[in-house]
């Protein structure tokens, strides 16, 4: 048996359906009802507008640092669009549009990024995990959820997101490997937005694609044009169907671009050219989708404008709800909430300490 | 009641909890057919099957991270780190997520998991198999940290840890795994986390300890009684977080003199916190400085010298005498 | 002498050491073109090139593990963890290898590396960006742990850390990164690791602190002087391991009353060790219990409430008054 | 650009030259001088005999737990045989034969496993790192050494070993990824001995081969019959030449078998069948190499016997040197050696404490 080529069990494919000019490959065009197409469009626009508004609020000092999603609307919405409400979302920290699609109130996003722990509160009806800031740490939780689903023989699936940078973390490797071994119903969506803060994709790994990393775990991998919502929906649908029918995990590399800053604390001028950004402006996921919808007669210019206005009003209403929520005085004592199911004695007494301090401070402020 | 080793008692706890509650799942490296390298999970895979007794790939962060997801889903994962020396691979998962998800999600999610780790020296093991670094966990907000000392309390504490609604790091003193047997009732026993016990009563001095150090401490107390007529009260902490400071401060108020014993390195070790609590709560009662009898602030040496590293009966007894001489 | 922020002072230290010693290499996430998210490594890649200022993939254990190998080879890696909140991913590498290779190899190999981590609260950051978990490192045998407090000592300590023959974990109080400026001499300055300083002299009470807490502590001392006529001596630890207990115990002997201040959680925090050392070394001089003014034993809240979590001037001053009232 | 297959940059090959019956594929047979062939043979036999002796010493309670190498002699010796003394070895904990080839005195091995820190001492002339017990942690050190080599423009290379189980650890992933990105001269030798304690290779990962994991990092990977020393030499030589000439890292999966226990604390009867072991006994790397050497007229039965006797004598001599080393009384105080370059005050005083305690204990033993 001399130098024998080893057969690899999975083909690696790249999927693109709607190109940057809005031209569709009709042989691959997924059969999506008009209503859903419009819903997807609306969610993408909402994501974009909310992002813009948050940037303004941040620049005004009304909220703190956050990670804008601009340019990644299709890769997020296209992926979560195929989930049911019984499925699980395990986000990183740049999936605001996906979280909103999955029912997260925008005012909670604002609360969180304006420094209120209340913003992290997850509604009982939602199967979204909170955002996970430590890069690459959350896909393992998706694997555990997937195990629970399998164990209880449920039909649910889990979708977890992470970035190109996250693929370097050991935890992501462990998650993919565990997922392969336990054949859990988990869809790993790697949003390759070409940058991890200042580190370009090419310095993150020497692998030609991120999708090929799936081969090391014996699970199907796929590269998808992440700015093409039709391709994202098609790829995610395939993966979700496989997972739901017991076929195990899938790794999807959604090739997209971070059109904005890494976070509002970041200055991308230090490390990337404006030309590069301009190249990707041409590939804007919303623009091309609108062209497509237009060519299908589903969206007129006025209708698009109407959507935009509705969405702005929605953002504004959320902002007002948020403003109301933070109107009253802060209660710092709530910082002890949720530390444990039941507060142990030392925390009860530390909470008392804080209470006394706050009262003393108030007295002092009052008297002199 | 049967006389059991700690390994058997822990096995009993797992077996009964698994039989009672199908949400309880055991996972880790070699916990299945092999029964765990210390055999704590022996026979479980035969009784409960591969779905509930999971042999995982070799990845500690993976095991902890997957357990977190399982716990969020509603399972009660009990995961084993093969040795505490490899558990630090999982610290970031426990710190960043297990310890925080309840808080972060406003109470929507919780992480009722147990991270079991055999820890400590004295078993002639290889490097990395003898550490005591309980402080990494005990200092982490949001985690509970339990260290049993005998078969019976190990069994009861493990049951309570499994039922606890929050994540518990459970350090098992492997030097006590098979060193002695104790009656352990077949019927269910629990023991409240966060509660210490008086392991021996006395009036002259208080010795506070936990885990594998309980045995040399009790032996030292016995010697002190016989040779010196000193009656030492021995407190067994059992839980390091939350810390039951009521019991040991009461004892200190009675005796006025305290020695703390642990095998972990001294500086920034658990003993420091005990001293600080004593100073905060019983300052005026202390008649002598609190002595710390501990491992040294170096890596525990390989086995030929580990007994000289670890606090032993001689070191403990001497420290007590010095404290009484003060 | 120029007035500099701590960020500039750290940058100066790196620049000068790199110019002087080609073995010094900087590595980490975004340390190159971006100059580090806090700009501590700003301009270094332009001056020293990509081979000496390495933008790594996003993997903290990788960065630490690679640095260990570089140091064994004879380089002097200074690696940056972007925030201390992500440094625990690297704890096992530091604990198992950086801290042990000299010992394990019988002196043949050593690991002269520096692990730099911005730490601490007060900068309105996101979750995981405000922790103080210095104990994880300070309790680990084989590591040194340094925490500067001002631009000038930060610069001198970083130079000494780089030249130290053993691994040093260097926690940078990011609340002090740009909060104030200090004269920092252009010419080389070093500062011996393991040495604390008196930051303010006084005779009535000793306040021991470090890192970002130095500023509110000094402010509290000033207020106490003005409002109450209390003269507080303030000790700035600068190094947590090895701990310079000679200086603070001498001060405690003089004043008889001590308050310790840190932002890390209280239980098993650095303050406990300070109390234990005081009890061991100056027991008979203590006229009151040592008060610990610290962060609470919970995760530091998001930024709207972090100032109530962190020890502030009011809390520190009140604790001093209570200690004096005892 | 519809569903397009992605070209992967590296072929994956399996290399086998000398089959389990000692038959050689002459088209691939490497050109190894007779002298070296005999040296390789001798090292393999030494590895086997020393291992057996250690097992006896362990069963007699004279040394503690250790990890036997039986069956993995070819995968170790074949790999390190191509290194020069200026190259670096970064072992895991089951490469005793490789370490001895690289100059480690057998008595040091015995010292270490009989619980003396002195056994870890590395001779100044050797470029071997000490064993690393935390699984998967050491390949990163190899990457760092490789960076040092590249930085100083040296011609050295680094070879690091780890097991099939280790491939699941995040650290190994990070090491392979860093190695790809920085193109360091590192050869990763994964000894796939089919077991990680009780976990079979098939439960460690769903990937068909471990070699294919290299694809995820854009580095060349290769699967090799690890019980075939000719194939190991050929593969290692190719990888070392590539690394030395600036071609970067290589991942070699050496497919072998752990014929003995995991460690002496292990009982493999609990988890694997004797039939499986017997299958691998047929593939013994030493037997087939002796057949090959015999067929080439390089090794007669008597010569083989002579080698065996020489080697036994060598082991015996080492054992005697070890016995001598541990004859005198222990000095526990040395436990403080090497904690730091210079012992800080608190350790000086803790050392004093221990000294006083030991003296007091001695006095007490003397008096009472
Ligand atoms: C473990 C960890 N290390 C470092 C950071 C700081 N950090 C936040 S985001 C980021 C880059 C992430 O890149 P990528 O995974 O590509 O996601 P993206 O930001 O592009 O969405 C870094 C380094 C972190 N949050 N967690
Ligand atoms: C991080 C870590 N986890 C667990 C262990 C305990 N342990 C020692 S060897 C081993 C199995 C290693 O398997 P593999 O990598 O295939 O190497 P092999 O033992 O087969 O040579 C385990 C789990 C360890 N030493 N380090
Ligand atoms: Mg990215
Ligand atoms: Mg193996």
Image (cartoon, coloured by chain):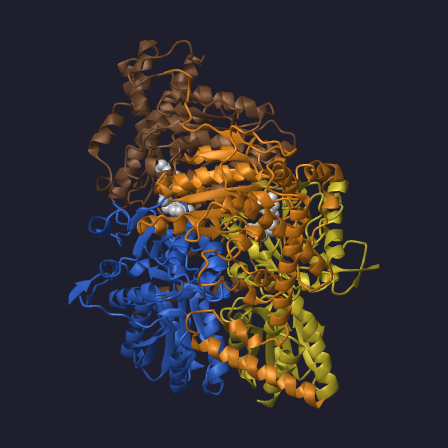
Chain colours: A orange, B blue, C yellow, D brown
Q: Is residue A264 above or below residue D312?
A: below
Query: Quick check: D309 left or right of A206?
Result: left
Q: Nearer the viewer, residue B143 or A286?
A: A286
* Image quadrant in which the N terminus of chain C is located: bottom right
Query: Quick check: C115 left or right of B21?
Result: right
Dividing the picture into quarters, in which one does residue D101 lie? top left
**Residue B11: % across, % down:** 24, 58
Q: Would residue B162 be seen by someone viewing this image from the given angle?
A: yes
Q: Nearer the viewer, residue D242 or A247?
A: A247
Q: Is residue C207 above or below residue A19?
A: below
**Residue B41: % across, % down:** 26, 53
Q: Residue at x 43, y 75 (%)?
A: A344
**Residue C187: % across, % down:** 80, 54
Q: Is residue D336 above or below residue D303?
A: below
Q: Nearer the viewer, residue D155 or A261?
A: A261
Query: Quick check: C256 left or right of B88?
Result: right
Ligand 3 located in image quadrant: top right
Q: How many marks?
A: 0
Q: Is residue D224 above or below residue B184?
A: above
Q: Would residue D92 be seen by someone viewing this image from the given angle?
A: no
**Residue A88: % across, % down:** 44, 52
Q: Determine the residue located farthest toward the right in the rendered image.
A: C1
Dividing the picture into quarters, in which one does residue C326 lie? bottom right
């Amino acid at each position: 048996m001399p130098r024998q080529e080893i057969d690899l069990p999975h083909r690696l494919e790249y999927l693109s359906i709607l190109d940057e000019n809005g031209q569709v490959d009709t042989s691959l065009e997924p059969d999506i009802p008009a209503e859903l197409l419009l819903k997807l469009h609306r969610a993408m626009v909402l994501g974009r507008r909310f992002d813009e508004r948050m940037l303004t609020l941040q620049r005004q000092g009304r909220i703190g640092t956050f990670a804008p999603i601009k340019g990644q609307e299709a890769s997020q919405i296209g992926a979560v669009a195929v989930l049911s409400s019984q499925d699980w979302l395990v986000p990183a920290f740049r999936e605001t549009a996906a979280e909103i699609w999955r029912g997260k109130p925008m005012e909670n996003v604002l609360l969180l990024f304006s420094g209120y722990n209340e913003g992290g509160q997850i509604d009982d009806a939602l199967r979204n995990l909170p955002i996970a800031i430590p890069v690459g740490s959350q896909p393992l939780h998706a694997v555990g959820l997937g195990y629970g689903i399998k164990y209880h023989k449920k039909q649910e699936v889990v979708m977890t997101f992470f970035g190109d940078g996250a693929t370097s973390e050991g935890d992501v490797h462990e998650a993919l490997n565990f997922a392969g071994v336990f054949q859990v119903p988990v869809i790993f969506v790697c949003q390759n937005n070409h940058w991890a803060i200042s580190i370009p994709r090419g310095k993150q790994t020497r692998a030609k694609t991120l999708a090929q990393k799936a081969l090391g775990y014996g699970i199907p991998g796929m590269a998808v044009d992440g700015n093409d919502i039709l391709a994202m929906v098609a790829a995610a649908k395939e993966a979700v169907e496989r997972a739901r029918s017991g076929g195990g995990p899938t790794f999807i590399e959604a090739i997209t671009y971070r059109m904005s800053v890494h976070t509002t604390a970041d200055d991308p001028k230090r490390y990337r050219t404006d030309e590069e950004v301009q190249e990707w402006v041409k590939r804007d996921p919303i623009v091309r989708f609108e062209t497509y919808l237009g060519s299908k007669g589903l969206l007129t210019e006025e209708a698009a404008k109407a959507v935009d206005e509705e969405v702005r009003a929605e953002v504004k209403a959320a902002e007002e709800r948020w403003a109301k929520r933070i109107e009253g005085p802060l209660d710092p004592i709530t910082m002890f909430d949720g530390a444990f199911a039941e507060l142990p004695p030392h925390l009860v007494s530390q909470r008392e300490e804080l209470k006394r301090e706050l009262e003393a401070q108030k007295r002092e402020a009052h008297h002199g | 009641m049967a006389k059991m080793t700690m390994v058997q008692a822990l096995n009993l706890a797992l077996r009964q909890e698994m039989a009672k509650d199908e949400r309880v799942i055991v996972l880790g490296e070699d916990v299945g057919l092999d029964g765990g390298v210390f055999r704590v999970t022996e026979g479980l895979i035969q009784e409960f099957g591969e779905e509930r007794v999971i042999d995982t790939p070799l990845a500690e962060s993976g095991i902890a991270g997957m357990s977190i997801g399982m716990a969020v889903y509603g399972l009660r994962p009990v995961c084993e780190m093969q040795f505490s020396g490899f558990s630090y691979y999982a610290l970031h998962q426990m710190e960043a997520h297990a310890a925080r998800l309840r808080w972060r999600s406003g109470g929507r999610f919780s992480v009722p998991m147990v991270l079991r780790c055999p820890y400590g020296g004295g078993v002639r093991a290889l490097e990395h198999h003898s550490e005591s670094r309980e402080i990494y966990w005990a200092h982490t907000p949001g985690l509970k940290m339990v260290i049993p000392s005998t078969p019976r309390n190990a069994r009861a504490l493990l049951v309570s840890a499994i039922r606890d609604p929050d994540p518990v790091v459970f350090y098992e003193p492997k030097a006590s795994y098979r060193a002695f047997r104790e009656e352990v009732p077949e019927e269910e026993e629990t023991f409240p986390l966060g509660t210490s016990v008086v392991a021996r009563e006395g009036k002259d001095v208080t010795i506070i300890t936990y885990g594998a150090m309980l045995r040399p401490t009790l032996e030292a107390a016995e010697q002190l009684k016989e040779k010196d007529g000193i009656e030492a009260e021995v407190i067994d902490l059992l839980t390091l977080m939350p810390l039951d400071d009521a019991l040991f401060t009461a004892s200190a108020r009675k005796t006025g003199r305290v020695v703390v014993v642990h095998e972990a390195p001294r500086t920034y070790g658990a003993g420091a916190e005990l001293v600080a609590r004593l100073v905060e709560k019983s300052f005026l009662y202390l008649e002598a400085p609190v002595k710390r009898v501990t491992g040294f602030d170096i890596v525990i040496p390989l086995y030929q010298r580990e007994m000289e590293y670890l606090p032993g009966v001689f070191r403990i007894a001497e420290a007590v005498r010095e404290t009484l001489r003060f």
